[in-house]
Image (cartoon, rainbow, N blue to C red):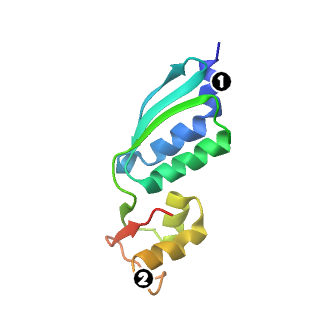
Amino acid sequence: MADLEQLKSKYAGVTSTIQEFSDIGAKVDQVDLDGDKLHIKGSVPSKVVLNRVWDAIKQADSTYADLHHEIENTGGDDQPYTVKSGDNLSKIAKHFYGNASKYTDIAKANNISNPDLIKVGQQLNLPAL
């Protein structure tokens, strides 16, 4: 019989990644056992966030043989984002892609010629990479 607490601990990065995006609609609905597998059910607002969840799954276990996941993308591929005070494109890229150097992809997708010139309240479209 699988140990629920042990599996929860192993995949804690997955549930915390989903919760990290709760301010934009991501949520964990259920974490329990499905036979010998951890069952995680939840939703994310875009493929951008779903890709971050997949990164967390693969980091926990590249085969994820002991995981049954039902993570639904409730939006489209891209993720809308409103620039907040203290943001820069590198910080946004690190949060959404796990890699600060992806700021160039955000700049290109939003026709931003100077990545250092973004403004609070500016609407960005973060592309699924």
Report whether residue 103 is seen: yes
9 relative position to 80: left or right: right
56 relative position to 74: left or right: right
Where residue 78 appears, x then y in whole percent?
39, 61
Identified at 51% across, 27% down, the residue is: 39
Identified at 56% across, 26% down, the residue is: 38
Kindly indicate the quadrant of the structure image that contains residue 60.
Answer: top right
Report whether residue 27 is seen: no
Identified at 63% across, 28% down, the residue is: 66
72 relative position to 15: left or right: left
SS for callout 1: helix
128, above or below 26, in the image: below
Which class describes the residues within 10 Å of circle 1: few (<14), some (14-19), or many (20+)?
few
Which class describes the residues within 10 Å of circle 2: few (<14), some (14-19), or many (20+)?
some
Where residue 23 appears, x then y in whole percent?
37, 49
For the residue pair 65 and 117, the one nearer the viewer reads as 65
Where residue 90 appears, x then y in whole percent?
54, 70
SS for callout 2: loop
For the residue pair 78 and 5, the one nearer the viewer reads as 78
For the residue pair 16 and 68, the one nearer the viewer reads as 68
Please identify the quadrant where the N terminus is shown: top right
Kind of residue at badge 1 = Gln
22, above or below 108, in the image: above
Point out the tag, 2 or 1, that comes first from the N-terminus. 1
Kind of residue at badge 2 = Ile
To which residue does mark 1 refer? Answer: 6
Identified at 53% across, 72% down, the residue is: 103
The residues bearing labels 2 and 1 have C-alpha atoms spaced at a distance of: 46 Å
To which residue does mark 2 refer? Answer: 112
Q: How many marks?
A: 2
38 relative position to 111: left or right: right
110, above or below 24, in the image: below
